[in-house]
Amino acid sequence: MIQIQRVTKVYGKQTVLREVTVTREAGTIYGLVGVNGSGKTTLMRCICGFTRPTSGRIYVGGDEIGRDVDFPRRTGIIIETPGFLPHYSGLRNLLILASVSRGADRARAEAVMRMVGLDPADRKRVGQYSLGMRQRLGIAQAIMEDPDILILDEPFNGLDASGMEEIHALFDTLRRQGKTILLASHSAADISRACDVVFEIRDGMMADMPKRTALR
């Protein structure tokens, strides 16, 4: 569960988030829609502990971020562009990350690559990947340690139609497993199809966005 209580974030004279309050339950996919600069990425960074709110509190899995823990436990994250070592293969990148956290083994790394439509035996360097392939690898990295919560910024970026179908199916499977998933995008249509509940963030404030409206 994610609980956001009256979160405000101010940079200099600019208020990016204004008294944002929302609770996100387990086993549900939530969407956050907003134009560039609306505050959606800032909110995700606050939830992940990368940025501290000016005021308000955020709880993830019962822990207060910035007080009980610096970063949320058992959470898979993509914020902005996924970063990888360009001279190594996709599998090698995942194995390096797994060796640092010790949260997954080779079999798991290979499995999550297949889950996102990548071949773990492909020796192509990540620097030669298309944008869509990099995005798939980013999602594989986010789910590799079987997190309870996923926080993904622009998860459909660079994916073609078949890739979007595969990732939609993956998110549906993860939801049935009881995961809490938060997706952010500037595209209301992409987000609405994937999500149970959609929020719109505008001028730092958030409101429910009916799915039928989001699809227009």
Image: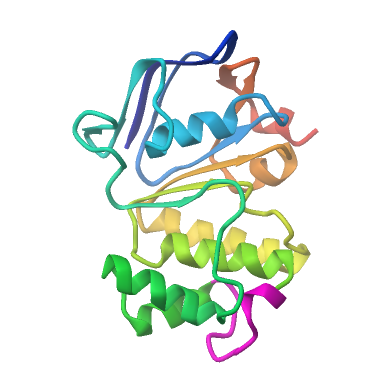
The answer to whether residue 117 is magenta is yes
At horizontal 60% and vertical 89% (from top left) the residue drawn is 122
- Location of residue 13 with respect to 94 vertically, above or below: above
Query: Residue 157: horizontal and vertical position, in percent?
Result: 70, 54
Farthest residue, direction left = 68
Query: Residue 22: horizontal and vertical position, in percent?
Result: 42, 22
Query: Where does the N terminus fall, quadrant-wise?
Result: top left
At horizontal 55% and vertical 62% (from top left) the residue drawn is 138
Asked where in the image residue 168 lies, by quadrant, the reply is: bottom right
Towards the viewer: 205 or 41 = 41
Label the magenta part by its dominant secondary structure.
Answer: loop
At horizontal 56% and vertical 19% (from top left) the residue drawn is 206
At horizontal 31% and vertical 74% (from top left) the residue drawn is 99
Query: Where does the C terminus fall, quadrant-wise?
Result: top right
Q: What stretch is highlighted in magenta?
A: 116-128
The answer to whether residue 37 is magenta is no
- Location of residue 71 with respect to 210 vertically, above or below: below
Asked where in the image residue 204 lies, by quadrant, the reply is: top right
Query: Residue 166: horizontal and vertical position, in percent?
Result: 63, 67
Horizontally, residue 100 falls left or right of residue 201, namely left
Query: Residue 70: horizontal and vertical position, in percent?
Result: 28, 38
- Location of residue 16 with respect to 129 vertically, above or below: above
Farthest residue, direction top = 13
Towards the viewer: 7 or 26 = 7
